[in-house]
Image (tube, rainbow, N blue to C red):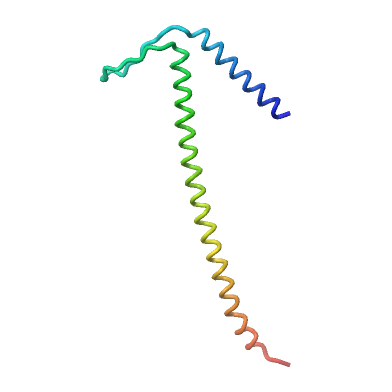
Amino acid sequence: MTSILRWAAWLIVAAAAVIFAVNNRGFVTLSIDPFPYTLSAPLYLIALMMFAAGIIIGGSAQIARRLRARSALAAAQARIKALENELTGLRLERQPLLSSAVPEL
């Protein structure tokens, strides 16, 4: 069921992109004022390039965030393991002390 909905959503997005491309075929010129470079391309192509750039930039930020979280998780797991080992050692040290402190009947 979810795969059908996913395909339907992608079909709607693709149809919207095709309709946008057909209705915006006119050429526009992009220029950044202090630089001499210009780009002439159809409006739909420039819009799709900006959309793709946004996806790439957002995806890169998400990957960086995920890598930082994974690194923090690994450090926390190592710290937990070290503390568990320390606790086990302290329990083993304490056990002979407790058994000698209890009087035998």
* Foreground of the two, 102 or 6: 6
Spot occupied by residue 30 in the image (x, y as percentages of width and height): 36, 15
Q: How many numbered marks are there?
A: 0
* Foreground of the two, 21 or 87: 21
Q: Quadrant of residue 31?
A: top left
Q: Is residue 53 left or right of residue 92?
A: left
Q: Residue at x 64, y 22 (%)?
A: 9
Spot occupied by residue 17 in the image (x, y as percentages of width and height): 55, 16
Q: Is residue 64 above or below residue 56?
A: below
Please state, as top left, top right, bottom left or bottom right, where the N terminus lies in the image. Answer: top right
Q: Quadrant of residue 18?
A: top right
Please state, as top left, top right, bottom left or bottom right, where the C terminus lies in the image. Answer: bottom right
Spot occupied by residue 80 in the image (x, y as percentages of width and height): 55, 61
Q: Is residue 77 above or below residue 47?
A: below
Q: Residue at x 70, y 92 (%)?
A: 104
Residue, far bottom: 105
Q: Residue at x 44, y 22 (%)?
A: 50
Q: Is residue 39 above or below residue 66?
A: above
Spot occupied by residue 83 in the image (x, y as percentages of width and height): 54, 66
Q: Residue at x 59, y 80 (%)?
A: 94
Q: Is residue 13 left or right of residue 72?
A: right
Q: Is residue 93 left or right of residue 3?
A: left
